[in-house]
Image (cartoon, rainbow, N blue to C red):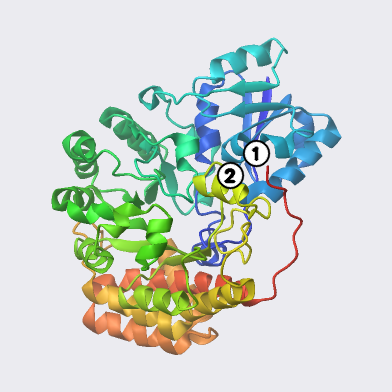
Amino acid sequence: MKVLMVYPQYPTTFWSFNYALKFISKKAALPPLGLITVGSYLPKEWDVKLVDMNCEKLKDEDIKKADYVFISAMTVQRESSIEVIKKCNDFGIPVIAGGPLFTMEPDTFHDTVDYFVLGEAEDIMADLVKDMENRSVKRYYVKTTFCDIEKTLPPRWDLLNLKWYASMSIQYSRGCPYNCEFCDIGALSGRVPRQKNAKQIVNELQSLYDSGWRKSIFFVDDNFIGNKNKLKRDVLPAIIEWQKSNRYPFTFYTEVSIDFADDDELMTLMSNAGFDRVFVGIETPDPESLKEANKYQNIKHDLEKSIRKIQSFGFEVQGGFIVGFDSDMPTIFKRQFDFIQGNGIVTAMVGLLNAPRGSQLYERLRNENRLRGEMTGDNVDVMTNIVPKMDSNVLVNGYKTLVASLYNPQNYYKRLKEFLSIYKAPKFIKSKISLPEIGAFLRSIFVLGIFGKERKEYWKLLTWSIFKKPKAFSKAISFAIYGYHFRKVAEKISKPSKTRKRIPAT
């Protein structure tokens, strides 16, 4: 059996890091974890090939040689998915589609996809493989309950060219205990967090190590700290022990909720394990908008104190922010800017409020006849699939101004310096600099220090870092490169919006 796995292309987005990847000679930020996990359930004697379109071109010959094409994607990859499926249709090769996009929008692809895997795939794969071997594949394979992820097989790293990626991915848990109105995680993964055990995680780390990986790893969990007791009791001590025995080959980053700041023991353990970055859904400093979004975990906390405390434990706090809530007034743009700038949140992803299918917001706005279609999935796209209460022109123009202001070199470098001034480099960070890092530094001098709009701020930061924060010098270079990407994305946002064909809401 010949199976071609295809991961569609991402557009240039906030998290794609397209402009930054060129500095380190990488092709993509992260690998397609879902596909390489599914690959572990296919018979070893099958001929399985993976094409990540973010790294290489999909060739017609690869499609024609396949008995089946597997495709998995997220909402932001919708347009590329449509193109891939059309190619497969043209060549008469059957498509088996799964993952978030197809699970939430099977109707969008009803006339083009041959077979659907809806829901989590682990418990479905045995039946699917058997039916593929018998050439009797069913139209739908539906899993309405959530699987036991302690039985999930480790990913097939051998399907990847590891040299193409800036970071690797591992999943420890699925689900989130919170119930934010705009979020579809409850529909996709449930509100009761499920975790792998410590042995599984250590085995996955070891398998990545054995494959030759030595850089950062993203724990892709929607909320890594959903079960704090298990983390503190079993998982983090096991990771710490493994890291120490292997001389800390990895650094980690993940997503957490703001109550991370409440647990000093947890923050200490995560820092000791090698975590140095956490993404937090802060959303907005406006309490009324937080209530509207059902984001009560944020209302209960002093957001500024919580952010500062997390930073003091050695973590960079990356923040997610939203404008366009029904409660938002035109003053929200200035409030968001002041909050982000004042708290040294260097990486601040700000998006217009959108309603993903499967969220409570989607259902509410559909009932209010305020849906414009399906969302694009691009967090920094100047489009929203809802009819906002704020005047649309005020909302869009305010949003563009906010993002442009945040990533104006002077403002960006100011809050970067603010963060680095309190940043404590983890003890496990190695002082030895790799050749790719040297290459990235030299490219940054050329692109940012000589020709870049930020060249004045760039040299001021480097000089400050050398004399005031020498241990954070490499971090300063990395942030300068990230800032270049964010600025380019901000410039893209400020351009007139292109008209796109909307997918109707259902």
Q: Give the residue at mark 1.
A: 105
Check the image and report above or below for 137 versus 58. above
Quarter of image, res 470: bottom left
- Please tell me whether mark 1 or mark 2 is closer to you in this view: 2
Quarter of image, res 490: bottom right
The residue located at (46%, 73%) in the rendering is: 483
| Disc 1: CA contacts within 10 A as few (<14), some (14-19) or many (>=20) | some
Which amino acid does the dot numbered 2 rest on? Arg
Instruction: Specify whether residue 43 is in view.
Output: no
The residue located at (43%, 86%) in the rendering is: 410
Give residue 370's position: percent from left, percent from top: 63, 55
Q: Give the residue at mark 2.
A: 357
Residue 126 horizontal side relative to residue 344, left or right: right
- Outermost left residue: 265
Residue 366 horizontal side relative to residue 290, left or right: right
- Does dot 2 land on a helix, a strand or a loop? loop
Check the image and report above or below for 49 versus 411. above
Which amino acid does the dot numbered 1 rest on? Glu
272 and 156: which is toward the camera: 272
Give residue 306's position: percent from left, percent from top: 23, 62
The residue located at (50%, 51%) in the rendering is: 165
Check the image and report above or below for 137 versus 57. above
Q: Compute the Cα span from label 1 to label 2.
A: 8 Å
Number of disc labels: 2
Give residue 419's position: percent from left, percent from top: 29, 73
The residue located at (57%, 36%) in the rendering is: 99
Residue 327 horizontal side relative to residue 463, left or right: right
